[in-house]
Image (cartoon, grey):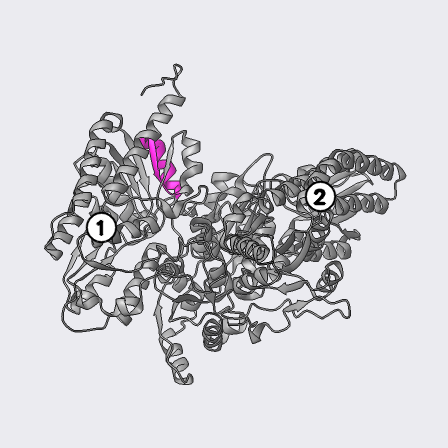
Amino acid sequence: MSFKVLDDRAGQVIRTSKLATVEMTCNKASAAGSVSQRACTFCGSRVVLYPIADALHLVHGPVGCAAYTWDIRGALSSGPELHRISCSTDLREREIVLGGEKRLEESLRGLITRYSPKAAFVYATCVVGVIGDDVAAVCKRVEDEVGIPVIPVMAEGFRGTKRDGYSAATRALLELIGTGNIDAIGPLSINLLGDFNVAGESWIIKEYFARMGVEVVSVLTGDGRVDEIRRAHGARLNVVQCAGSMTPLAKAMQEKYGIPFIRVSFFGIEDTAHALYEVAEKLGDPAVTRRAQELVREELGKVLPALKEFKKDLQGKRAGLYVGGAFKAFSLVRALRQLGVTVALAGTQTGSKEEYEELQAVCDENTIIVDDTNALELANYLVEQDIDVFIGGVKERPIAYKLGLGFCDHNHERKIPLAGFEGAVAFAREIHATATSPIWALMPRKAARVTAAKAKAVSS
Amino acid sequence: MSCATEQDAVHSTSGEATVNPCTLCAPLGAALASAGVRDTVPLLHGAQGCATYIRRYLISHFREPMDVASSSFGESQTVFGGESNLHRALDNVVRQYQPALVTVATTCLAETIGEDVGRLLRSYDERRSTHLPVVSASTPSFKDGHVEGFHAMVRALVEALATQRGPQIRTVNILPPIISPADLRHLREIADAYELSPTILPDYSETLDGVILDHYCPLPTGGTRIEEIAGMPRALGTLDLTLTGKAPRASAVLTERGTATKILGLPIGVRACDSLCDALAELSGNAMPAWLEKERGRLLDAYADGHKYVFGKRVAVYGDPELVAGLAGFLAEVGARPVLCATGARNRALQDALSGLPAGSVEEVLEDTDFGAIEAACARLKPELVIGSSKGYRMARALGVPLLRVGFPIHDRLGAGRLLHLGYRGTMQLFDSVVNTLLEAKQSSSAVGFSYL
């Protein structure tokens, strides 16, 4: 049976061509019955706020939403680890009938007493939106009583897509930003938006900026602290790494505080160098630019030999990738090209029309590009495009492995930092370890090819 | 033995909120049960996230593809009802998967807005020219957890599909709780050894522990065939290994439809395995096969070799009620003390299931609990070993006590699907693991570093 994309998903799968850029249908609700790889509005808000380590994160609803997001991201903290526990109001039938406000209020009081957080986020889940709890009123009441910010995150799962969850997180963060003292912040200062310190990546990037003499006022939200976020409005530039989740916040801060923003990526050596240069340029201090150049030269000297070694083995391999936001996709296409690897399948959960145009421009001809795809499409295109290594998250992993091809986790659960210059080497090592593993020669897909090639050699 | 307090009976035992849940939501159990029926796609009626989160959770454990569809509610479905989305979802699932069966489980959202799924499915059927078999279960997580959701879907499957009447056939029905694919395979092996072809419902031993493929199959091979389910009332008997509390059992439906049911604990430990084998011997008229007799003997031999290492050891056990009860029975049988038995399940079945254990071996039972409360209980009871899912790792680490990983979920080790807990063979593996975990703790904390233990 030949593969056909669902009618409901027409326009969400395109093939790149030199002749024309195609407009992607995107940013729409997942088609019913499609088995999307994407979650919900709640998920969008939860992933963004999750790394704030000294805040209480209380999921208001039945227990599942909290259970599935317990310790779900490898977002590291250098201090408190409140973000790694899972708190739920665990609503039961009684609250569904009578309302959950009382339970929410008691839970908040109890948890705040027990854990002494610097702030509390209350995530409203689907049923809360239906039973009509006044979450904002409860938060306000508790906030007045306990004296820490208690912030409602109105991200009921049905309210939209994961992107709408990003907006809900933005609104929550804006409650904190602007409430801290910024007197001590100098002119060479930035916020890093959309780095979540997965496997310690924020620390790598912060170290670069320290060497350049640039102050990082706050990271939103990697290794996040409430007091740092409160001061974020004092920075002179917003550097947006995960553009999908953080562009709304950057735009809001530009409007409200006049802070300009740039979109960058710290994945791959090209993009990392470009990001550092661009920050230096925007800050307008020649000394910073000079230090950035020195840093890039020094780091490249360390990593280029290793990358060249990996490239020898990887030249000509074909990769597929499915990631959250489009900016990571652009970076990965470039980083893989640097390693001699061609991307022949690329997709995102939350890309915008403009971003898909750029993705088409970045990719080679005949690349398949998918928006909010599903398991069957991915499986089909992995085979059709003859992919050697697939880059994605946990839900994509078994699809690759089941077909006997390599996989690299570039999502929440990765334990190895893949950002910055050293991250580029780690990424190359990961791709190398999976793409050149000797086990694939044993797998039926490859083994059949070897047999066929041998038979052909004998007959000719 | 103390019981959960009145307060706890209303809610979890961490106090005002649930901290680190020891349960998943009901639709996860329903989806997992559905994965054990051949050519079946589970569909969750509600917002998209439920299906995606559940897939991710199950994939991290089984390391296998696990497709769960969703009717993907938006705001308008939440306000006006999800009929058209459910119909569209069914259409798209059929288009993509050509399933033999679709199961529909309700999410909290669908239940809260009062969706009448039965009516929506009837209207779907009227619209279609061909009949699509669909089985639905009501699985709101403000009521139930994954254990209850699993039981609810199995019962719904039996109710809807196990309808054949007629002369007896030489089969046995086995209704397991959530166990590993390796356990399911071993149960089949044992029943086969008594020359009783078993109908195990559900049986995800192949679908969630499959072989490598050269091309992708939308539906994994394996699972109980719908025709097998249909024939369940004609079996020689039903062995029900579940604990459902006051909730109705799937086996009760089969009893009504003419087959006798025996309710057994999970076969962990010599006595529990003997009960299973006795039941199979009685149904089949066959004696225990020689190889199984040998495995039994080997297990007893291992008990003799290792009994002193485990005697009097204080152990905390947590997880699904059937597994906890089975493990507690096994631990007591070898002279260890399951001082804490805890489950996040809400069906209040565990306490009763433990009543047969020697007095004093269990000191505390927690039901409808969370890891916050389990950790507090461990601090009081001071276990020397913790046995349960990987979700207790941080607790065990904080307590400085070794953790033996069993059951579901295991998210930080490879091979969860291949862990064998059941039968004489599985018990032997468990016993070896218990002893070796204790020995390793002893060895690594010893200044001498003995090379013989």
Q: Is the residue A160 above or below the residue A141 in the image?
A: below
User: Residue drawn 52% across and 49% down?
Assistant: A142
In three-dimensional space, the C-alpha distance between marks 1 and 2, rounded to whole angstroms, equals: 66 Å
> Three-letter amino acid code at disc 1?
Ile
- Is residue B376 on the magenta stretch? yes
Occupied quadrant, residue B127 = bottom left
- Image position, residue B5 (x, y; %): 28, 45
Q: Magenta span covers which residues?
A: B371-389
Per the image, the residue denoted by label 1 is B190
| Residue nearest the viewer, comparing B64 with A195 | B64
Q: Residues within 10 Å of mark 2 (few under 14, many from 20)?
A: many
User: Residue drawn 43% across and 53% down?
Assistant: B58
- Is residue A26 on the magenta stretch? no
- Image position, residue A174 (x, y; %): 67, 53
Q: Is residue A159 left or right of residue A234?
A: left
Q: Which residue of the protein is positioned furthest toward the top in this rendering? A: B448
The chain carrying label 1 is: B
Q: Which residue of the protein is positioned furthest toward the right in this rendering? A: A286
- Image position, residue A241 (x, y; %): 71, 49
Per the image, the residue denoted by label 2 is A231
Q: Is the residue B37 above or below the residue A215 in the image?
A: below
| Residue nearest the viewer, comparing B412 with A240 | B412
Q: Is residue B293 visible?
A: yes
> Three-letter amino acid code at disc 2?
Arg
Q: Secondary structure at mark 1?
A: helix
User: Residue drawn 35% across and 65% down?
Assistant: B38
Tag in front: 1 or 2: 1
Q: Quadrant of the C terminus of chain A?
A: bottom right
Q: Residues within 10 Å of mark 1 (few under 14, many from 20)?
A: many
The chain carrying label 2 is: A
| Residue nearest the viewer, comparing A13 with A318 | A318
